[in-house]
Image: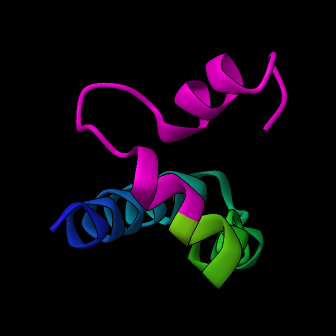
Amino acid sequence: MSAFKHFVLITKHRHQVIRNASHLGIFFQSLFHDLSKYSCLEFKESAKRYKGTSSPVYEQRKEEDNYS
């Protein structure tokens, strides 16, 4: 279930970025923003650490001495 919730979270973030970037006139750049979050490797790692209260990247940095 956390994988689905994480997918919804990053998709909402992407839509917000696209919406905000279109106001700035950089719509096409926003389409490619953070597409790596959907890659198998990065998605699995982030979904594993998803809690809904903090960033999975932040959790990974705490576990791995500030590297993600």
Residue at 23% over, 73% down: 4
- Would you identify the image quadrant in which residue 2 lies? bottom left
Give x and y (percent) for residue 43.
55, 69
| Residue with the most extreme left position | 1
Quadrant occupied by the N terminus: bottom left
Residue at 43% over, 44% down: 49
- Would you identify the image quadrant in which residue 42 lies? bottom right
Quadrant occupied by the C terminus: top right
Residue 48 in the image: above or below residue 42: above
Residue 65 in the image: above or below residue 16: above
Which residue is more in the foreground, 41 or 17? 41
> Left or right of 45: which side holds 32?
right
Residue 48 in the image: above or below residue 49: below
The magenta segment is 45-68
Query: Number of marks in the image?
Result: 0
Give x and y (percent) for residue 9.
31, 57
> Left or right of 31: which side holds 68?
right
> Left or right of 48: which side holds 59?
right
> Left or right of 2: which side holds 24?
right
Which residue is more in the foreground, 20 or 40? 40
Residue at 42% over, 59% down: 47
